[in-house]
Image (spheres, grey):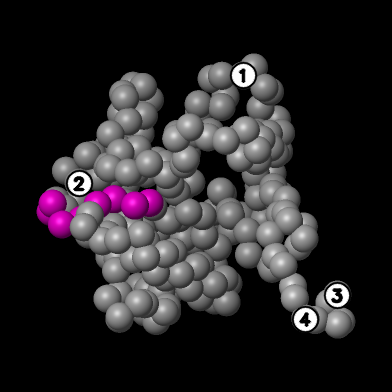
Amino acid sequence: MGRRSVRAFRPDPVPGADVVRILRAARSAPSGANLQPGCFHALTGAPLAGLSDALVAVAEADRAPVSEYSYFPQPMPAELKAKQRAAGYALYSALGIGRRDIAGRKAQFVENYRFFSAPVGIVVTIRPDMGKGCFMDLGMALMALMLAAEGMGYATCGIGALANYADVVHGHLGLGADEMVVCGMALGRPDETAPVNSVETDRDPLEAFAMLRGFTDPT
């Protein structure tokens, strides 16, 4: 309940041993038929800076996205669009970016491609022939990664926008055709003084997503 998406990090380096421990926790997540879908490419220092620079260059040039899958429903239902807008409003309000400040919004979105200046960036991939269940398994692995990091005093932020320029990621990391870019992950110590890290998005009330039957003492 204490975990949240962090978009500003301290520059403190993350020891490789800690990254290994976190990735092993991710791999310990449940997996149907023990297929263990997904690969994690962890970068820091010059490798991370190089990838970030390449991504920022195409993002700032407004190059059309090249994604290998659709993250959101197409088209987006109205009730889900309202949630998306509310999350965006909370983020931009915390940063003092107005609704009509297009340049400010774009600049903040580009921070995705800088991995929010985190000392560690992780590129998450999956085989393109995997079924929907394997995406579910990968999601559990990502949550296991996030919780392991949280338990060690680190913070994380998933970066779905990384898939917008999957071709850039492929080229920079030399990925093969058997790896589809799913998302990125920023990892590091949170900057508790950054206004952006004060953002907390709402969650649906229990009655909106859960049905309890046969219980006599729900609280």
Q: Residue at x 65, y 38 (%)?
A: 79
Of the numbered discs in the image, which one, if any, rests on residue 214?
4
In which image quadrant can residue 169 be found? top left
**Which residue ends up furthest to the front in the rendered image?**
214
Of the numbered discs in the image, which one, if any, rests on residue 219?
3
Q: Amino acid at mark 1?
A: Asp
Q: Amino acid at mark 3?
A: Thr
Give me the C-alpha separation between circle 3 and circle 1.
43 Å
Q: Amino acid at mark 2?
A: His
Magenta-tinted stretch: 176-183
Check the image and report above or below for 79 versus 216: above
Observer-side mark, 3 or 2, equals 3
Tell me whether the residue at label 3 lies in contact with that at label 4, contact meaning CB atoms closer than 8 angstroms: no
Estimate the x, y position of residue 78 in percent, counting from the top left: 62, 33
Of the numbered discs in the image, which one, if any, rests on residue 101?
1
Q: Residues within 10 Å of mark 3 (few under 14, many from 20)?
A: few
Label 4: state its secondary structure.
loop
Tell me whether the residue at label 2 lies in contact with that at label 1, contact meaning CB atoms closer than 8 angstroms: no
Label 1: state its secondary structure.
loop
In-front residue for pair 54/193: 54
Tell me whether the residue at label 3 lies in contact with that at label 2, contact meaning CB atoms closer than 8 angstroms: no
Estimate the x, y position of residue 162 in percent, counting from the top left: 37, 44
* One can see residue 3 in this view: yes
Observer-side mark, 2 or 4, equals 4
Give me the C-alpha separation between circle 4 and circle 1.
51 Å
Of the numbered discs in the image, which one, if any, rests on residue 170?
2
First in sequence: mark 2 or mark 1?
A: 1
Tell me whether the residue at label 2 lies in contact with that at label 4, contact meaning CB atoms closer than 8 angstroms: no
